[in-house]
Image: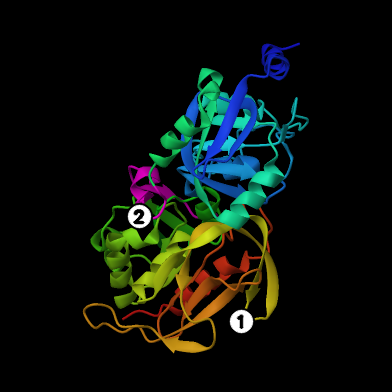
Amino acid sequence: MTASALLDLDRILDGEPAVLVLEDGRAFYGQAYGAVGETVGEAVFSTGMTGYQETLTDPSYHRQVVVMTTPHVGNTGVNDEDDESRRIWVAGYVVRDPALRPSSWRSARTLEDELRTQGVVGISGIDTRALTRHLRERGAMRVGIFSGDRAGSPVAQLTEAVLDAPLMSGAALAAEVTTSEPYVVPAVGEKRFTVAALDLGIKAMTPTLLAQQGIEVHVLPATSTFEDIRAVGGDGGPDGVFFSNGPGDPATADREVAVLREVLGARIPFFGICFGNQLLGRALGFGTFKLKYGHRGINQPVMDRTTGKVEVTAHNHGFAVDAPTDGEVTAPSDADGTAYGRVRVSHVCLNDGVVEGLECLDLPAYSVQYHPEAAAGPHDAAYLFDRFVQLMEKGNRA
């Protein structure tokens, strides 16, 4: 038996204690999973049955404690190919029944070993169904996981520690997850276009899929200016601009919104996903709001109003755009009186009617709230990258 297997067996037999405490004082007792210690963050649940490695390494989950609704987690282990970024970003991890050992030929190590190595505190053996129902009824809230000696502290004391944690509303987190230096993902095959991609928490699969369209992708830090964007591609500037997914409250992203308004004003073709969709909404003059418990998982139904097709899509967002969902509307003018013409909500979530996409009808710009790169997840939305190519082919510039 390997040292890792012995460690797992010791954990199961000894029952290294752990407790999960929500900000409203409800507690769940279980066993430590991953690193032993304590962590706090926003409790959210993910409904995906697969793709936990991509979830863990998605920067959009920064400062969130992820509850897996599927009971059995870890059976495919962890490999060296499926990470979506340079590290695990979740603040904590909650599972019901962790696998004793991985069974995939691609596995390089166990999930718990990876969590332990990266210092991610988790908990197992709790009723994740009850926890998920609690979050659905009460809404996403702050949570703490405490293992080892700390697990024996009074719940009231642990609740105070949870309440000291910052709220997700008002959190500006893109600068904490973005790349520190620009880098280039070269086009696959013949180069057709050059795109400036603002990294607000980008997943590795996104520039990979753009590159497969013949696009040379210049990934820029979240702090980049419009001048930095225009410098991509030489004197002519980039053929398109992309804003990625990312964590935090879009209401805090005033600087990024100002940059996007310059992009729209220059009529450079624009595509945004997730956080980028929320920033497009703000740039067009709409507001944003926090969802009760958000959309997270790889099985969310969304209707594309252009085609009437219902797609099964991958989501990870706790905020949404507040825009009229029926018909075309004129975008509200921004503070300096700039108008952006007609806009329509192009996609809606069929579970709750939340805005899942925006399309500008008088500007070359569109966005979606979900993750079309499908890592992990279905491939129903891959056509959205084709639409970006079509926008750039038209070359609709001022």
Question: Residue at label 1?
Answer: 306
Q: What's the residue type where badge 1 is placed?
A: Thr
**The residue under label 2 is which amino acid type?**
Gly
Residue at the image position 49 percent from the left and 88 percent from the top: 328
Q: Secondary structure at mark 1?
A: loop
- Mark 1 and mark 2: Cα distance apart in space: 34 Å
Identify the secondary structure beneath mark 2.
loop
The quadrant the N terminus occupies is top right
* Residue 124: in magenta span: no
As drawn, 75 above or below 183: above
- Magenta: main secondary structure equals loop
| Range covered by the magenta-colored residues | 167-190
Label 1 packing within 10 angstroms: few (<14), some (14-19), many (20+): few
Q: Is residue 6 above or below residue 55?
A: above
Quadrant location, the C terminus: bottom left
**236 vs 305, nearest the viewer:** 305
Few, some or many residues within 10 Å of mark 2 (<14, 14–19, 20+): few
Residue in the image at 64% along x and 30% along y: 29
Percent across and percent down for residue 300 are 66, 62
Residue 54 is drawn in which quadrant?
A: top right
| Residue closer to the observer: 281 or 251 | 251
Front label number (1 vs 2): 2
Specify whether residue 376 is in view: no
Q: Residue 2: x, y in percent?
A: 72, 12
Percent of width and height locating residue 302: 64, 70
Residue 187 shown in magenta? yes
**Residue sitting at x 61%, y 22%:** 17
Which residue lies under the disc numbered 2? 170
